[in-house]
Amino acid sequence: MTSATEVLRQSVVVFSKNYLPVSRVNIKRAIALLVTGKAEPLDFTMGKGGKGIAVHSPSVVLLVPEHIRLTITDRERVWKVPPVNRREVLRRDKHTCQYCGSTKKLTLDHVIPRSKGGKHTWDNVVIACERCNSRKGDRTPLQAGMTLRTQPKAPMHPTVAFSEQFWREQQVNLERQEI
């Protein structure tokens, strides 16, 4: 028997009207979407012993599916790639020097220095600690004998990032079931 707090901690995956996994919402939000008709159950296996989350009230037991699909055709929000600035680069690089992994005294570093034609773009700016930044100086990482931990790139649309993570998790779950 699961407690009320355990049930309320569970989440439901929300798909767009055209079946793109969009986000994960808490059980209360999922119920609100279902009851107001803004979403419909997407678990086709629920009637055949599939999994759902049972939510009990004094008079009703709701079986909430693990996946729901939005039925409303609200225009998709326009998402713009954020500007290349210190705050956004820190977020992307997880507040970590991309050369040594330090989290202290962080600065912006141009992989290809601006003096050598490097641009102030997402694929040329990384976070580096003061020590690594001064060691690299006005050279490329190759010239300085340093390697980047990750290749810099522009942030991904949040829906696309969630979708990729969702399908990766589904693949892992399928592989576990086969074992």
Image: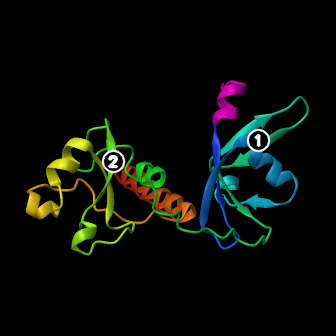
Instruction: Please give the residue where the numbered disc 2 appears in the rendered image.
Output: 107
Q: Which range of residues does the magenta coloring cover?
A: 1-9
Residue 5 is inside the magenta segment = yes
Q: Residue at x 85, y 32 (%)?
A: 57
Residue 157 spot, x, y in % from top left? 53, 65
- Amino acid identity at mark 2: Thr
In the depicted structure, whether residue 16 falls above or below residue 177 = below
Height in image: 57 above or below 28?
above
User: Is 108 in front, or is 166?
Assistant: 108
Task: Name the quadrant of the N terminus.
Answer: top right
Provide residue 120's location: percent of width, then percent of height: 37, 68
The front one of 2 and 30 is 30
Q: Which residue is mark 1?
A: 28
**Local crowd size for mark 2, using a 10 Å CA cut-off: few (<14), some (14–19), many (≥20):** some
Relative horizontal placement of residue 92, taking residue 44 as reference (left or right)? left
Please state which amino acid type lies under the numbered disc 1: Lys
Q: Quadrant of residue 150?
A: bottom left
- Locate residue 121: give its quadrant: bottom left
Q: Residue at x 27, y 50 (%)?
A: 98
Residue 62 rendering spot, x and y as whole percentages: 80, 42
Residue 27 appears left or right of 119: right
